[in-house]
Image (spheres, helix red, strand yellow):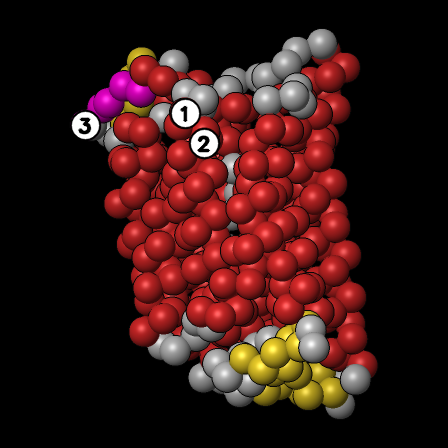
Amino acid sequence: MFSIFLPVSQADIWWPGLVLLGFLIGIVTGLFGLGGGFLLTPALRIFFNISYPVAIGSSLLQILATSLFSAYKHWRQKNLDVKLGAVAAAGSLIGAECGVRMLRAIGNQGTVSISGHAILFTDLVINICFLVLLTAVGVSMYREACNSQQCGIEEPPTQLAEVVKSCPLPPFICFEQSNIDRLSVWVPIALSFVVGCLTGLLGIGGGFINLPLLIYFLGLPTRIAIGTSTAQVLLASAYGALRHMQDGHVDVLLVVFMLVGSVGGVNVGVWLSKRIDPCNTRKYFSALMALAVILISFDLLRRLVS
């Protein structure tokens, strides 16, 4: 009664679980300005046994829809730097194309054997990428948030941001909404290129990398960084979803079930973002990274010993 066969995913899915997963991802999107792909992609693989290529493509379409709604909400609250998001779009789109091509190349490698256990090369590479990135970002952000709280400051120190802003490569541009008077246009393009690569490769909106980049490298206030990150996630995931759809890696019916829950989740997340101080927001962000690391580690170990 509560199961449905999805032809693209080639699996019988308990659809209420997809609705619940969509609701949780919606909260993450609204609260942190993330697409939630770093949780959604492995969750589809671990709990619903959907192959990584389909999980990645479907995650991007889901992220596109939730980010669109979330970006609109943050724009209404004036938490979104539209100019910065537009400039970063160029790097995001080029990076997303590179990421899609990398995933295609990895997928052609078949399986590998580790200690006598066969595992898809795609599963191995993507899980390791997730573990390295999530651990590095989560630990760094948690340590900084604790230091800021001990010093009694709401926003993180901007020494690194000042160094980045001194980049001498023209042309230069100002971003009034983010309180940036002068910045080389190549800085946000380069940062967004990295985020775009991760979007195409891992099926993430790139927000869990993009958010700390905006906060620590560009010195954006946390709330402005959250809103602007949502806009960049929207652009990168749109292109990534289109490219994966061309490869037949998007299950639209799967996404529809998740979107049912996401609408309510985004509203809850945006509401929470206005009521949590920036320092605690960064701590909760780190806790979310830790949860994702636990899930992915469990999945990797399970596949290696099965």
Distance CA(mark 2)–CA(mark 3): 31 Å
Q: Which residues are magenta?
A: 171-175
Task: Work out whether 21 lies above or below 273.
Answer: below
Across and down, in percent, residue 65 comes to 43, 51
Disc 1 marks which residue? 76
Residue under the image location 70 percent in, 25 percent down: 280
Whether 200 is drawn above or below 275: the answer is below
Give the residue type that dot 1 points to.
Arg
Disc 2: which residue: 73
Mark 3 or mark 1: whose residue is earlier in sequence: 1
Q: Residue at x 63, y 14 (%)?
A: 154
Pinpoint residue 193: horizontal percent, then vertical percent: 36, 48
Q: Crowdedness of circle 2 by 10 Å Cα count: few (<14), some, many (20+)?
A: some
Q: Position of residue 85 (x, y in %)?
A: 33, 35
> Where does the image place residue 218, in percent across and percent down from the top left?
43, 26
Q: CA distance from mark 3 to mark 1?
A: 30 Å
- Which residue reaches farthest front? 1
**Label ID, residue 171:** 3
Q: Between disc 2 and disc 3, whose residue precedes?
A: 2
103 to the left or right of 273: left
Q: Measuring 74% from the left and 47% from the top, which residue is drawn there?
A: 290
Q: Does the segment drawn in magenta span residue 129?
A: no
**Compared to 254, does 225 lie above or below?**
above
42 to 246, vertically: above or below: above
Tell me, yes or no, whether the two marked residues, 1 and 2, touch with CB atoms within 8 Å: yes
Q: Secondary structure at mark 3?
A: loop
**Magenta segment, prevailing SS (helix, strand or loop):** strand
Q: Quadrant of residue 229?
A: top left
Residue at horizontal 55 percent and vertical 63 percent from the top: 257
Residue furthest left as drawn:
171
